[in-house]
Image (tube, coloured by chain):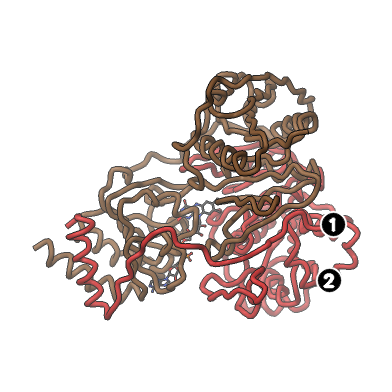
Amino acid sequence: MKILVCMKQVPQKDAPLKLNEAGTWIREDVSYEVNEPDAFALEEALRQKEKHTGEVVVLTAGPARAQQVLREALAKGADRAIHLEDAAFVGLDAYNTARAIAAAIKDEKFDLIFTGLQSDDYGYAQTGVILAQIQGWPHATIIMQIEKNEGGIRVKRELEAGFFQFVDMPLPAVLTIQSGINKLRYATLIGIKQAKTKPLRKVTMTEVQAAVGGNLQKIEKLYVPQKSKNTEFLEGPPAEVAKKLVEKLKNEVRVL
Amino acid sequence: MTDIILVVVEQREGKLNRVSWETITAGQAIAAQTGWTLEAAVVGSGVGTIAGEVAAKKVAKVYDIESAKLEPYTPDAFSHALKEFLTKHPAKVVLMPHTYQVRDFVPKLATSLHTTAVSDVIGCKYDGGKLLFTRQMFQGKFVADVSFAGAGPCFVTFQNGSFRADKVEAGASAAPVETVNVDVPDGVVRNKPQEVFKEAKQAVDLTQAEIIVSVGRGIKEQKNIELAKQLADALGGEIAASRPICDNGWLPMDRQIGSSGQTVAPKLYLALGISGAIQHIVGMKGAKSIVAINKDSEAPIFEIADYAVVGNLFDIVPPLIEEVKKAKG
Ligand SMILES: Cc1cc2nc3c(=O)[nH]c(=O)nc-3n(C[C@H](O)[C@H](O)[C@H](O)COP(=O)(O)OP(=O)(O)OC[C@H]3O[C@@H](n4cnc5c(N)ncnc54)[C@H](O)[C@@H]3O)c2cc1C
């Protein structure tokens, strides 16, 4: 099976984020990491390849710093990488991101495309599904298991509140992968070494420009949410805070 | 031509998903602000009763979009049917709840109409003739006001709980219901969905718990879960967790709180090292009292907490256990 995994670099979970001056985006001088579900998507692709042979290609759209995500994926076992490299990719809406990706892979023949189910920055939860529509392929979202069968694949979709559903579907297809589908591996030292010699194709914005249109969504303003609750902050050294909290639990919450 | 706001309510296996009332409330609010006309639609096979139920609310009209191919749900059939409908009945905005089903087909539908979907919206503003939708970004650390461009319709999906189902206005009289039969040709539907099922029997019913101590990734290691258990025991409560803890197998799945786990409303919900992602919050925001202990003063969990402690949980929990024991005598 030939599998493409779309991965994104996002600000680290614990990174303190600040707004830019225009109040339309964050200040970009923070630490980044791979979007969590994308890491699970990569792991799943590697496992499928180990079972059925084939090739795992990883792709990201983002500035030079995003190459780190591809290097890590190559170190874990991906065969080659595609980098749509331009800072402007960060500002594209989901439709245009998917259009740019489709243009960059038009000469490839994948059986499967995996994306994470959503990104921790925009949280659109759309790019994978849009990519399927552009390719004319079927898709399934929030996937927790993938098995090959005669007609194609059987996937397990997560539904709300602990429910699941199996879906049979033909290939090629796009799947959006949920965190927790598998256990992530670490890169080995040999893997890290080998990654340096694996092919990485760069695609410029100019090359895919013809496929991309104006954004249909625009962030007019980004800001810190207003608190809706009257939160009481308990302060002091731990022992004192513990005392204060127990007072509240006794007298106000009345559970003690 | 009047501008139309269309709410597509959600049905599953012939039953209305109650979260749809929230979307109707949202639609009524936008209609009041803009003066546009609010209509509703239900998509499925033999779902006329649901159309009737919706027609009792303050909406101008309800469409019952029917095809045998719409049961069971598939993204191909739903997208095809709504595209056909919207091509004949243009709307300015199309509103839906942000459910797993909606997020499965709406991006496809919007793309097939060369338009856009603003997802996971928590509010809207009508400002100088421009409709803005507010949505969370960066896992709830920020929110954004988003505008849309293009010929439309613009699809908007609303996060659970953003509008109140009990605020939905009833109509003076029942709205007219029009049945629209759509043709979904053979070959359109490629996926074959099987029965919906629940993984395992639940060993615990957290919905009945009065006190819940819930741990998140801030607990760092599996062995530290013991500390949280001691606190839960001291309080006489149950232990629960955010999703990553259950994904790791540190606690069983049936102790997961959130959109893909259990929804609880205890007297006390004590969150230890949980950031407060929306998918977690929807499962516990109904708690009478929420206590959050988190080292990050900007963690979104504090936005819904009644009592907040900014600090290292490993410093605070041990003395807390002692104080609770003392208080209980
Ligand atoms: C479709 C979908 C469904 C989902 N369903 C669910 C669901 O049902 N339930 C659920 O919980 N999640 C769910 N999620 C995942 C959700 O988006 C979050 O990723 C998850 O809730 C984060 O868990 P967390 O808060 O434990 O971890 P993190 O977000 O990593 O937060 C850890 C927190 O711990 C704090 N911390 C770290 N160390 C310490 C310390 N020493 N002392 C105090 N605080 C500390 C940090 O400041 C941080 O705020 C779902 C996601 C999707 C996309």
Front residue (pair B282, A221): A221
Closer to the camera in the image, A121 or A36: A121
Report the chain holding disc 1. A
Residue A28, located in which quarter of the rendered image? bottom right
Residue B289, position as x, y percentages in the image: 30, 55
Q: CA distance from mark 2 to mark 1?
A: 21 Å
Look at label 1 and name its amino acid.
Answer: Gly
Q: Which chain is brown?
A: B
The residue under label 2 is A202
Mark 2, mark 1: which one is toward the viewer? 1
**Would you name the residue on which mark 1 appears?**
A213
Task: Specify the colour of chain A.
Answer: red
**Residue sitting at the far left:** B329
Percent from the top left, x then y, of residue B34? 65, 43
Dot 2 or dot 1: first in sequence order is 2
Q: Are marks 2 and 1 in contact (CB under 8 Å)?
A: no
The amino acid type found where label 2 is placed reads Lys
Camera sees residue A1:
no
Q: Give the chain of mark 2.
A: A
Residue A156 location in percent, x, y?
58, 43
Pinpoint residue A34: horizontal percent, then vertical percent: 63, 68
Residue B272 horizontal side relative to residue A254, left or right:
right
The quadrant in which the C terminus of chain A is found is: bottom left
In this view, the residue in front, B105 or A106, is B105
| The quarter of the displayed image where residue A236 is located | bottom left
